[in-house]
Amino acid sequence: MSIYLRTLRYFRAYSGQTILAVALMSVGIAFNLLKPWPFKYIVDGLLDTSHGTLQAREFIARWFGWTNATGAVLGLCLVLVLLSLLYGVVNMLSNALLIRIGLRALLHLRTQLYSCLQALPLQFHDARRSSDSSFRVAYDSQSIQTIYNKGFATIFGAVVTLVSALAIMLRMDWFLTLVSMAVLPPVVWAIRHYGDRIRRESTTIQERESDLLASAQEGLGSIRMVQAFGRESFEVEQFVRHATRSLEANFRLNLTSMRSALVVGTLMALGSAVMYCAGSLQVMRGHLSLGDLLVFVAYLATLYQPIEQLTYTAWALEGAAAGAQRCFEILDREEETKDAPDAVTLTTAKGEITFAGVSFAYDPKAPVLTGVDLAIAPGETVAFVGGTGAGKSTLLSLVPRFYDPTAGIVRLDGHDLRSLTKSSLRAQIGMVLQDTLLFSTSIRENIAYGREGATEAEIVEAAKRAQAYDFIMAQPQGFETPVGERGGHLSVGQRQRIGIARAFLKNAPILLLDEPTSALDPSTEKAIMETISELMIGRTTLIITHRLSTVHHFGRIVLLERGCIAEQGTGAELLALDGSYARLHRAATHMPEEIPGHAPTTQS
């Protein structure tokens, strides 16, 4: 029940519109309940001349002034049409209003869910597939509209109709009413019995559909590699496997729904048959008029319809609750790097960065960083080198607070990073990564992503400083040229220059470079490094690279081994130590070594 109550909170802002929709729905129900009566008066007042009730004839004469039978029949039929028209119009207006409210609540939930996912730390996203998060935003969120439009709204209409019809039927014949309601206990049992199964099977479907979406996204997103290795048939087999599991889950749910519908339908038919038998006996004994029986039969349908609606609504709610639960799982997650209540805004940073006894572990049993102590002066350039898994990227990720250290403190200009707001901290940091991520928009919009509100002149200037202007103007539409999905229309070097242009545009005092040239050929790397060298001027720069030739002449090099600082100093100083850095440098520059049985060779 807590899921449904929590869902209702999204509709508090629309309480006035909901009350209006409920009022319209009530009026529509009243019109619907009046629909059987015109035919009753036709039967009892006009057709049944031998046993026609005086009350029905007097009603026709008093209220309509019809003494001619043909005119009375036509008039009562027109009244029936009018009641149906009024019911349809009012019902349409109430449904339109309810649908609009449901869609607005859906927009609210999707926005909140997407905002929450954007704020959650990288550790959360690293542990999950992006397709699962996308599925929750796009599909699971629709459960809120189902719960409102097919749940609460339907329940209200069904309950009002049920109570009203029951009151009228009790007034007409209490015995037949009790006979009709005898099916209610077994129907309630069926609702409870099948409801739990439907929720479990709906949850399974959501998970299977998420797996299917992940399979499709990964296969299509890696289409170049798939075709290069001739793995098309393998990817199709993978897709078919996930699609088959989804099919089986859907079939199980539909089978459960069909079984439940069979049970409920049979119970309704049994109740109708018993009522028809008892009602016919009442008419034959003269205790009930034929018109009254016809009205009672009409109200029986009106009575059973909301019972069926409540049954199917209960099952629909169970299915929707499974999707809502998956949404709330995201919204309930604690933001691990959230701002402290007393966090301050950093307006301008000098760029002094200090790591004091910093340790970090994704898994407590496998620490990535251990006791790192390092002081970086404003404007200084520090290169981090070391083998794969040494902790270089993790160390850089602590600076913008993608993660918080599990022990120790990271400071900026003397401030503990956790005492600063994340937005103001990250505003002081520019980044250029190994694989520059571009959005499937224009080149201009991708560069402008570096700073909100940048002018056209500033965007052009950033492109020129990144030496990207010439190749941009050579494109068919210049700065308005679409880059394709993930920048697929551009070369690696061109994408990297756009990433550098972003950093120029942001103009932040701190620059983080994570393998900015590792995917480039030597000539392109040299050109890119010349551009990056200009970007580094006057900024505190932390750079990660496996290409020691790129950073050998930098001011300071820090060598990490197993999450600890093993060596640090200039390139020349570290070579003189003849330690780990010297071995890495010799391996990187292919210095000749004697191999037993072979003469030394020189490689460039």
Image: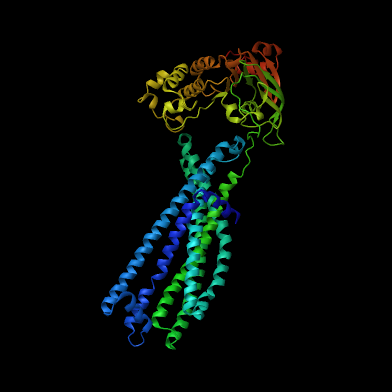
Q: Residue at x 42, y 74 (%)?
A: 298
Question: Residue 186 location in percent, x, y?
Answer: 56, 71
Q: Is residue 400 left or right of residue 316?
A: right
Figure coloring: rainbow
Judge from the rendering whether residue 588 lies leftward or rightward of residue 234; answer left or right: right
- The reply to whether residue 596 is in sight is no
Q: Please, is residue 602 above or below residue 308 in the view? A: above
Using residue 521 as the reference point, say whether residue 408 is left or right of it.
right
Q: Position of residue 499 (x, y in %)?
A: 49, 24
Q: Quadrant of the N terminus?
A: bottom right
Q: Look at the image and tell me in which quarter the C terminus lies.
A: top right
Q: Toward the viewer: 427 or 373? A: 427
Q: Say how many tags the image has.
A: 0
User: Residue 31 versus residue 482: which sits nearer the camera?
Assistant: 31
**Which picture quadrant has residue 87?**
bottom left
Residue 554 location in percent, x, y? 61, 13
Compared with residue 428, is residue 102 higher up or lower down, i.e. above or below? below
Question: Is residue 274 among the parts visible in the rendering?
Answer: yes
Q: Give residue 30's quadrant in the image.
A: bottom left
Identify the residue shown where x is 45% and y is 23%.
494
Q: Quadrant of residue 77?
A: bottom left
Q: Pinpoint residue 135: horizontal percent, then vertical percent.
A: 51, 45
Residue at the (54%, 72%) spot, across then down: 184
